[in-house]
Amino acid sequence: MNIAQTDGSVKEKIMRRIFILIISRLVIITVFLGITVFVDVKRELFSLSYIIINYFYIIAGVIYLFSAIYIILYKFKLKYQYILYLQITVDILSITFLIFMFGNTQIDYSLLYTLVIIYSAIFFGRRGGLLVASIASIFYGFFLNLEFYNLMPSISAVHYNEKSNFADAFTNLIVRITSFYILAFLASFIVEQEKKTATLLEEKASEFNQLDRLFRSIVESVYTGVMTIDLNNIIKTFNSAAEEITGFSRGAVQGRKLENVFPEFLPFLTDEMMNEQMSNRIEMVVKGSDKDRINLGLSVSPLKGKYEKRIGNILIFQDITKIKEMEKDLEKSRNMALIGEMAAGWAHEVRNPLAAITGSIELLKQGMELEGTNRRLMEIVLRSKDQLETFVRDFLLLARPVPAKRESVDVNKIIEEIMENIKLNKGWNQQLEIRTNLSDGAQVLANKEQVRQIIYNLVLNAVQSMGGGGLLSVATNRIKRDDGVEYTEMMIADTGCGIAEDDLEKIFEPFFTKKEKGTGLGLSIVNHIIEGYNGKIRIDSGVGQGTKCRVWLPVGEPVEEKAKISR
């Protein structure tokens, strides 16, 4: 808290107290006026003259008038010291007038001085209290002398025949003056203690606020999700990193039950699981606000309050989705490297005998007139030979690097050629409908045959998934993604059987297939080629919902960043 804020709050506090003083005075004078009216009505019971009652009315009226002036000055925010000086002066003069006009024998009006002394000490401290006590003592001593020598006005309703002796008057003076000063000291002491306590509280509050801001700043600055819950699993705090990781806003989760937002956390809140997490971080998967799966590294600890009493739990988590993807990519790269080595050696050992077999079969076929069973057997041999050659060729593609020589390839032209040729494929169904939306400028810098391989494999998969007919949609577009690189986007969608969610994690693995006659190398080859060009591929699918495949290949020179596969 800076000085300006402190001064402003102190002034506001003083002005509030001044307003309370004004209202309190109005309440007191209203009670005084009520008593005066009652005495006026029942005057025969009190034997008071009209003059005395009228003086009481005059005093009440004067106090009301000055109270109105105080309120006006308060509303116009006059300097508070001036308002207080005026109130002290008027109050002292009013009390002095009462003593002067009615004496101090019947009613001890000098006691009213104590009220002025107290609020003077409250507003002006010890000096103010002692100054008003001194003024009150002077007036009281002066009028005590006048009363002692019978020089006071004789309008009091009761007259005393006995004259006070000097010792009684002097004792009364000493006791009253001493009480004024003692009251000033006590009031100022209490006020000073209150100020010291208030200052100490402000300092502690300021220190607490600084620590609170520091704590919040630390919690908000770290890129680690921090969430606290109470013993009823109500979410209490949710930092900025937690918002970014999960996609949920703070306002959307605070105050809600944990099981209604993150039910995946509940199994890890048992004492047994928390003890395990003290030494090992738990890895788990949750669904974010957009229903995407997020891999988290989670630690849960008890949240303790005063006297080490447990008041809830604190959950600290980090997004390890990219780390898990990197681990998968690394594992896949190792597998692909191993497959590449196997493919190179295996293909060398198989291609030579396969070439000899192929040549021999062709020669036999040319020199023989086969009919019936022999003809069918020869067709089976030739078809199996072709399948084996296709498998060897595909297998070699997994080990073959992307050609260094690249050219600008017109993607739209390749798509048009494939759309014509696919109708000749034996998997084509006449009930299939093709819909294309090809944008101008769909160029990529790549090897033409490999681009053809990517599109053909994806289109073939789409056609084969729609055995009973359906809609095949193919589109191209030129876009710039978040990484700042310009890509040609190819979208191939079908309305076929779709892919199960569990299988989406495996579709790029070699030899993984759900087809009866498939080799499981098609998408592996597609992914291998795309990675070689630092492109990206994303496949969205669900059982019975069809499949949508998006491929992004760079338009210009490839970036050095490794290709990412997003599912």
Image: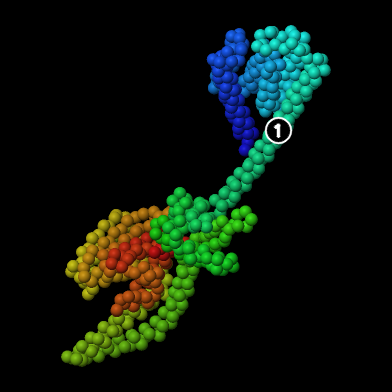
State the residue at coordinates (48%, 66%): 267
Quadrant in the picture for the N terminus:
top right
Residue designated by label 1: 190
State the residue at coordinates (48%, 55%): 234
Quadrant in the picture for the C terminus:
bottom left
Name the residue nearer the viewer: 160 or 125: 160
The location of residue 308, given as percent across then percent down, is 62, 57
Left or right of 34? Residue 458 is left
Left or right of 406? Residue 4 is right
Task: Please say whether residue 9 is visible from this viewpoint.
Answer: yes
The location of residue 486, given as percent across then percent down, is 39, 55
Q: Secondary structure at mark 1?
A: helix
Q: Relative to 474, is 69 above or below?
A: above
Q: How is the image coloured?
A: rainbow
Which amino acid, by three-letter code, is at mark 1?
Ile
Q: From this viewpoint, which residue is outermost toward the right?
A: 167
| Among the 4 quarters of the image, the one containing residue 545 | bottom left
Q: Relative to 165, is 309 above or below?
A: below
Name the residue nearer the viewer: 120 or 101: 101
Q: Relative to 567, is 132 above or below?
A: above
State the residue at coordinates (61%, 28%): 17
| Among the 4 quarters of the image, the one containing residue 518 | bottom left
Left or right of 190? Residue 5 is left
The location of residue 339, given as percent across then percent down, is 43, 77
Name the residue nearer the viewer: 257 or 299: 257
State the residue at coordinates (55%, 19%): 34
Task: Please say whether residue 69 is visible from this viewpoint.
Answer: no
Left or right of 155? Residue 363 is left
The location of residue 214, given as percent across then percent down, is 60, 48
